[in-house]
């Protein structure tokens, strides 16, 4: 995601008195900016749109061989279709949840452009969240929906229900906010330490492992499974996708509500940590010696 510094955003007058209106205005302008970029680089878009279904075909052929060799219709609680869709849905995580907010913030500090963000009529937290919202809304329309439909043509999701899709959508939206709060907290460290790229690498490794993106948590040794489910990262992918695939251990609405509340708690917790670090660090921040 870019800073969109050259967009020429001109928020309504007295913006500081109407933060919600200003944020919505910025969201619309940023969405139009991403749309122009998409139209300008159409070849990249079509290549990306075709690449992921090809990868899913390879995954499907591979697991057909695995299930056929083991002569089983179920592997660690996943049918063939569910297993293929699990790996296919891992791409949805990058469309809808993943962000590089911490990297962007670090680069602004390093290149001396952070002060431009700090003088806006809304907080850095709001600006980053609005940028993320515009980017993810664009990804939803132009990446998630087309690829989801292509996946459904390749391998019909017989396990899919309207209820499961709704719960997946709700938890994925919350996952995007949780991951944003986590990334913002890391990015704020750049106000004191400037380069936080090492933390970004650690974040990528930890999230891809313990969120179950790289490999289903059911494949982990039992002790590692318990560790993964005790940490907050499984809410980013493993738990939402379990409702999409119909593999959640308890599909009752009461259980879903409990999951939602716990995930919301982690999201608020990370958000408070990020805001706390921000208010402490920004007071000591010096840009280009000023």
Image: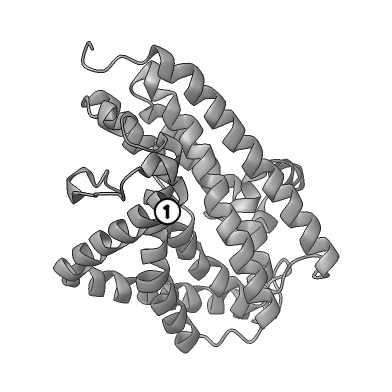
As displayed, is residue 16 above or below residue 190? below
**What residue is disc 1 on?**
21
Image quarter of residue 233: top right
Relative image position of residue 192 (x, y in whole percent): 40, 16
Which quarter of the image is occupied by the C terminus? Answer: top left
Relative image position of residue 228 (x, y in whole percent): 68, 44
Please, what secondary structure does the residue beneath circle 1 have?
helix
From the viewer's side, name the closer residue of 215 and 131. Answer: 131
Q: Is residue 263 left or right of residue 42?
A: right
Relative image position of residue 205 (x, y in whole percent): 49, 40
Relative image position of residue 125 (x, y in whole percent): 45, 38
Residue drawn at (25%, 31%) of the image:
116
Q: Residue furthest left?
A: 40
Tally of marks: 1
From the viewer's side, name the closer residue of 66 and 166. Answer: 166
Q: Is residue 159 left or right of residue 49?
A: right
Image quarter of residue 217: bottom right
As displayed, is residue 195 above or below residue 236? above
| Res 221 visible | no
Q: Is residue 35 left or right of residue 195?
A: left
Mark 1, Cα crowd under 10 Å, few <14 / some 14-19 / many 20+, is some
As displayed, is residue 168 above or below residue 131? below
Residue drawn at (65%, 36%) of the image:
269
Residue drawn at (67%, 58%) of the image:
239
| Res 167 visible | yes
Residue drawn at (62%, 67%) of the image:
168
Image quarter of residue 238: bottom right
Q: Is residue 200 left or right of residue 232?
A: left
Q: How is the image coloured?
A: one colour
């Amino acid at each position: 995601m870019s800073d969109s510094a050259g967009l020429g955003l001109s928020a309504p007058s007295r913006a500081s008195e109407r933060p919600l209106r200003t944020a919505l205005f910025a969201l619309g302008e940023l969405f139009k900016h991403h749309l122009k970029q998409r139209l300008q680089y159409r070849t990249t878009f079509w290549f990306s749109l075709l690449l992921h279904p090809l990868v899913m075909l390879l995954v499907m052929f591979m697991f057909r061989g695995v299930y056929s060799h083991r002569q089983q219709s179920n592997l660690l609680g996943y049918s063939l279709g569910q297993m293929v869709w699990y790996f296919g849905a891992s791409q949805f995580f990058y469309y809808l949840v993943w962000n590089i907010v911490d990297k962007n913030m670090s680069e602004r500090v390093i290149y001396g452009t952070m002060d431009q963000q700090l003088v806006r009529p809304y907080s850095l937290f709001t600006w980053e969240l609005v940028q993320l919202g515009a980017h993810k809304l664009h990804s939803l329309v132009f990446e998630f929906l087309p690829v989801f439909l292509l996946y459904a043509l390749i391998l019909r999701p017989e396990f899919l229900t309207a209820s499961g899709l709704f719960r997946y959508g709700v938890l994925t939206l919350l996952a995007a906010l949780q991951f944003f709060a986590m990334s913002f907290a890391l990015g704020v460290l750049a106000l004191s330490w400037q380069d936080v790229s090492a933390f970004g690498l650690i974040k990528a490794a930890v999230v891809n492992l313990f969120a179950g993106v790289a490999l289903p948590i059911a494949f982990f040794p039992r002790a590692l499974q318990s560790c993964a489910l005790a940490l907050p990262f499984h809410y980013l992918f493993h738990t939402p996708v379990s409702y999409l695939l119909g593999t959640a251990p308890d599909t009752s609405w009461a259980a879903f509500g409990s999951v939602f509340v716990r995930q919301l708690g982690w999201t608020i917790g990370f958000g408070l940590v990020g805001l706390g670090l921000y208010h402490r660090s920004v007071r000591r921040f010096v840009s280009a010696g000023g």
